[in-house]
Amino acid sequence: MAKNRSDVVAEVAKKAELTQVQVNTALDALFEVFEASVAAGEKITIPGWLAVERTDRAARTGRNPQTGETIQIPAGHSVKLTAGSKLKAAASKK
């Protein structure tokens, strides 16, 4: 089973005794901080839960799967999410 944003907002609102609008606003603010920090190359760490950081990808040679032609893939960036100890422990429970 998967939870979408609406499900998470409703559940957090109930547990924190807040309105869904307040939780949605807080989530939007959190994601804006993540976006700005990752764009600036800063690492965000929430101890025990997760770490988010931007990673660099070097330029490399690839292959077009349809034609087999060799292509150059430019350098770029990606995002790395690392689970913390509490999140890992929750994943190992049955």
Image (cartoon, rainbow, N blue to C red):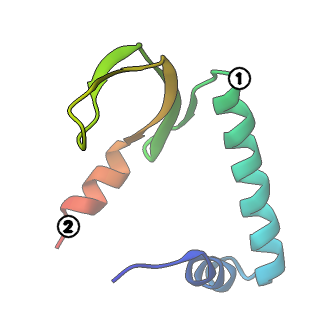
Question: Which residue is found at the position 64% from the left and 85% from the top?
Answer: 10
At mark 1, the secondary structure is loop
Element carrying mark 2: loop
- Give left or right: position of 94 versus 58: left
Nearest the viewer among 9 and 73 is: 73
Q: Please tell me the numbered disc located at residue 40.
A: 1
Question: Identity of the amino acid at label 2?
Answer: Lys
Res 17 → quadrant: bottom right
Where does residue 85 sit, x and y in percent of width and height?
A: 33, 44
Depicted 76 relative to depicted 16: above or below: above
Are there few (<14), some (14-19), or many (20+) residues within 10 Å of tag 1? few
Residue at position x 62%, y 82% in the image? 6
Mark 2 or mark 1, which is nearer to you? 1
Percent across and percent down for residue 72 are 39, 18
Residue 30 position within the rendered picture, expressed as x and y whole percent measured from the top left: 72, 51
Q: Name the image quarter holding residue 62.
A: top left
Look at mark 2 in the image and give the residue it sits on.
Answer: 93
